[in-house]
Image (cartoon, grey):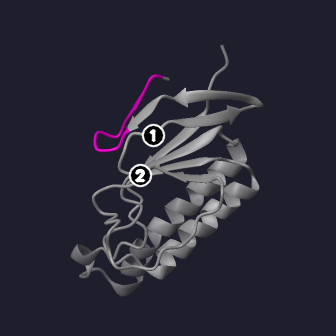
Amino acid sequence: MSTIRFIHAADLHLDSPFKGMTGLPPKRLNELRESTFTAFNRLIDHALQTHPDFILIVGDLYDGEDRSLRAQQKFREGMERLNEAEIPVFITYGNHDHLGGNWTRFEMPPNVFEFKENIEEVSLSVRGRKSSYMDSVILNGMCVRKW
């Protein structure tokens, strides 16, 4: 039986304003606000170095309904880098992602699969073998079943 290697990430909160931290010195506050992008870039770099079979990002990619264009562009750029390396990415959204919000939607590259509200099945090719590794995904419980 072959193994499956994947990276699981959650709660990226890209471009969080860290509103409760406004008392910090300006330089420290700016570093803190940039930290979500720094962590995200490290995640992408690690994936490019280790080349997992796929990446699973579950919930709270952004920090609220008014997601910034910068956050969305940085996320899309990371997904494009993974696309160039042929690393699939599976995304579920969380309570901070507000899918019905009034924001500009960026189109994702073809390596990105976004789970919707219903249970869905996804087939994945791992090292040349096409198999259905995920029989179902329950979004509210964030539970992947039948591996």
Q: Amino acid at mark 1?
A: Glu
Query: In the rendered image of this protein, does residue 113 appear above or below residue 124?
Result: below
**What segment carries the magenta color?**
138-146
Q: Quadrant of residue 128?
A: top right
Q: Could you classify mark 2 by the number of other residues whose Cα lies within 10 Å: few (under 14), some (14-19), or many (20 or more)?
A: few
**What is the quadrant of residue 6 in the picture?**
top right
Q: Residue at x 48, y 74 (%)?
A: 105
Q: Residue at x 50, y 68 (%)?
A: 37
Q: Position of residue 104 (x, y in %)?
A: 45, 79
- Circle 2 sits on which residue? 116
Question: Tag on residue 32?
Answer: none
Kind of element beneath mark 2: loop
Q: Residue at x 31, y 70 (%)?
A: 64
Estimate how packed mark 1 is, as few (under 14), some (14 to 19) or many (20 or more) residues with alpha carbons within 10 Å: few
Residue 81 vertical position relative to residue 50 in the rendered view, above or below? below
Residues at marks 1 and 2, CA–CA distance in whole angstroms: 8 Å
Q: Residue furthest bottom?
A: 26
Residue 15: image location, x then y, percent:
42, 73
Q: Nearer the viewer, residue 34 or 135?
A: 135
Q: Quadrant of residue 139?
A: top left
Mark 1 lies on residue: 120
Dot 1: what SS?
A: loop
Query: Where residue 14 sits: x, y (%)?
Result: 43, 68
Percent across and percent down for residue 68 are 42, 79
Q: Quadrant of the N terminus?
A: top right
